[in-house]
Image (spheres, rainbow, N blue to C red):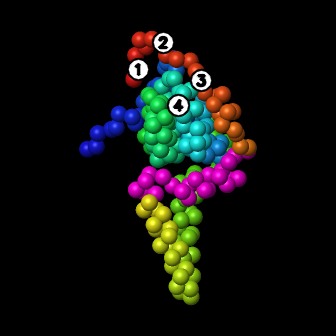
Amino acid sequence: MTTPQPDRVDATTVRDWLDRPDPVTVLDVRSPAEFETARIPGSINIPLNLIADHAGDLAARLDRQVVLVCQSGTRATQAQQRLTGAGAARLYILDGGITAYTAAGGDVIRCRARWSLERQVRLVAGTLVLAGLALGWGLPRARLLTGGVGTGLVLSALTNTCTMGRILAALPYNRGPRDRAATEVLTQLPTTQLPAGEPRP
């Protein structure tokens, strides 16, 4: 039996936190298009690429308890690492992401349905592997494509990053109705601090 990590919280706990009067900020680090598909009410969308580029500015504005959300938990973990490295504290990862939150009966706002970034990565990687194998019968060098995808997947696992995901996130399909500047995102962050001596979960 595995012991839950202290910086991870399950969907039921997050639901309880959101029902309490204590200030809790929910940051959704998925792409704008994924956020548009299904999101926790009151959550703020700050895509992982913006966090990577502006971690210091964001960390300076996070003065309350924060729950990081993505599709399954991987991107939220990367966001936590970057923000913690920039000095942010009290960051929690929603274990299992929006998928687990929905499965636990959490309230979500649904709009236009789109594929999650993880699903898109699997589609593109699988297509490239099949293309490399198919073309490899006539063009032996085409098999390098398959090897390249395999190498990329291994590096992705070892570094807990995904270059293909970052590329796909930049496509118009994943950017949502419009791009937002970092300054616009920063102004959405609340700045109210918890009262002194307030107990924390």
The answer to whether the residues at label 3 and label 4 have Cβ atoms under 8 Å apart is no
Residue 66 shows in the view: yes
The answer to whether the residues at label 1 and label 2 have Cβ atoms under 8 Å apart is no
Q: Which residues are magenta?
A: 156-177
Q: Earlier in the sequence, mark 1 or mark 2?
A: 2
Q: Earlier in the sequence, mark 3 or mark 2?
A: 3
Against 5, is 127 above or below? below
Residue visible at 51% across and 23% down in the picture: 63
Residue 190 marker: 3
What is the C-alpha distance between the residues marked 2 and 4?
20 Å
What is the C-alpha distance between the residues marked 3 and 4?
12 Å
Question: Residue 37 lies in what quarter of the image?
Answer: top right
Q: Which quarter shows the C terminus?
A: top left
Residue named by callout 1: 200
Residue named by callout 4: 59
- Image location (x, y in percent) of residue 141: 53, 82
- Image location (x, y in percent) of residue 8: 40, 36
- In reply to whether residue 167 is colored magenta, the answer given is yes
The answer to whether the residues at label 3 and label 2 have Cβ atoms under 8 Å apart is no
Residue named by callout 2: 195
What is the C-alpha distance between the residues marked 3 and 2?
15 Å
